[in-house]
Image (cartoon, rainbow, N blue to C red):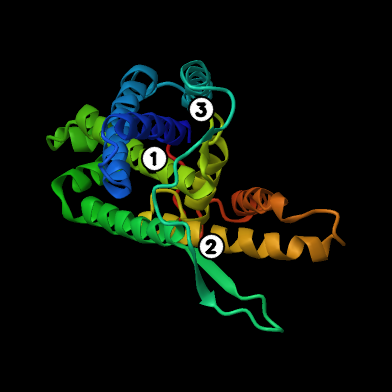
């Protein structure tokens, strides 16, 4: 989640530099270049995290990587505060923000609107998921990833380099986190050092809901989680007599996480497997 934050912050800095030195570049090219820079930086951050923090712990007890992840998260947040600011920073709106009427408002219905930024986010999300599915199931690297995930020892005997594959996975995931960070910052119009915490937990919740290790399940889990949150935010005021407002929508994500972990830890589309010794 905090790699997402780093991507947004790096993109924010890159946009500022590009707008100052190349004012005639245009909004969309500026955003694309900033996104590429953020993806490269986050890929290097992801590689460093894997190489320094996780690789030495591959044979450690399961709790060790979790504690390390918390430490890395705190480190990234602290560095972000030192480099940028502890206060939210305005993120330039480089995409059109004019609302588009999807459902026209009437006397009985409030109508529905959507912005161009939200359309771009949905298109990018589907393209990225499609690309990931092709990568994992149709490429040599994807087959190596699945082999390492299934049995690293046997994969090594078959000629797969675990260090290379795991590092490549971290770099790809970190680059995609940068993309998510830029999209979130563009949607909300600001970036801050703590912005990656909640999206990171929600991403984990979506993965658990769909089934850990199942890309299609993670996509389905993300869509379902979004629907649950929005429906909950819309009705929570009526259900609680106005005590809680729509700003409590994050509560539903964690309710879903608890329910899934208790009643179906393998997720909706995950397979039930025996715990490895």
Judge the density around disc 1: few (<14), some (14-19), many (≥20) Cα neighbours within 10 Å: many
Instruction: Give the labeled residue for mark 1.
Output: 177
Does dot 2 land on a helix, a strand or a loop?
A: helix
Of residues 192 and 164, which is closer to you in this image?
192
- Crowd rating for badge 3 (residues with CA inside 10 Å; few <14, some 14–19, many 20+): few
First of labels 1, 2 by sequence position: 1
Residue 54 percent coordinates (x, y): 38, 23
Is 127 placed above or below 190 here? below
Residue 76 shows up from this direction: yes
Mark 3 to mark 2 CA distance (whole Å): 26 Å
**Quadrant in which the C terminus appears:** top left
Cα–Cα span, label 1 and label 2: 20 Å
Towards the viewer: 64 or 68: 68
Task: Confirm or deny contact between disc 1 and disc 3 (CB under 8 A).
Answer: no
Please name the residue that numbered disc 2 is placed on.
224
Q: At 43% from the left edge and 41% from the top edge, which residue is drawn?
A: 181
* 10 Å crowding of disc 2: few (<14), some (14-19), many (20+): some
> At 48% from the left edge and 61% from the top edge, which residue is drawn?
98
**In contact (CB < 8 Å): disc 1 and disc 2:** no
What element does badge 1 sit on? helix
User: Which residue in the protein does label 3 denote?
Assistant: 66
Q: Earlier in the sequence, mark 1 or mark 3?
A: 3
Q: Quadrant of residue 53?
A: top left
Q: In this view, does 80 lie to the left or right of 250?
A: left
Residue 162 vertical placement versus 230 (above, below) = above
């Amino acid at each position: 989640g905090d790699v997402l934050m780093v991507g947004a912050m790096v993109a924010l800095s890159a946009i500022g530099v590009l707008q100052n030195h190349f004012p005639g570049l245009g909004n969309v090219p500026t955003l694309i270049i900033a996104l590429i820079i953020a993806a490269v930086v986050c890929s290097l951050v992801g590689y460093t995290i894997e190489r320094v923090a996780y690789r030495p712990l591959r044979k450690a007890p399961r709790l060790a990587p979790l504690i390390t992840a918390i430490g890395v998260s705190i480190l990234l947040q602290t560095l972000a505060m030192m480099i940028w600011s502890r206060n939210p920073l305005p993120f330039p709106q480089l995409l059109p923000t004019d609302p588009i009427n999807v459902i026209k408002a009437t006397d009985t219905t409030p109508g529905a609107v959507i912005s161009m930024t939200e359309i771009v986010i949905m298109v990018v999300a589907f393209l990225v998921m499609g690309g990931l599915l092709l990568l994992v199931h149709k490429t040599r690297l994807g087959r190596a990833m699945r082999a390492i995930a299934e049995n690293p020892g046997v994969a090594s005997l078959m000629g797969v380099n675990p260090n290379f594959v795991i590092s490549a996975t971290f770099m790809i995931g970190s680059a995609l986190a940068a993309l998510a960070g830029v999209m979130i910052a563009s949607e909300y119009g600001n970036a801050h050092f703590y912005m990656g915490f909640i999206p990171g937990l929600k991403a984990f919740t979506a993965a658990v809901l769909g089934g850990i290790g199942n890309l299609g399940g993670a996509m389905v889990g993300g869509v379902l989680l979004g629907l649950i949150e929005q429906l909950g935010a819309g009705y929570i005021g009526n259900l609680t007599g106005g005590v809680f407002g729509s700003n409590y929508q994050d509560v539903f994500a964690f309710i879903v996480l608890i329910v899934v972990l208790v009643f179906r830890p393998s997720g909706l589309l995950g397979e039930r497997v025996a715990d490895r010794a």
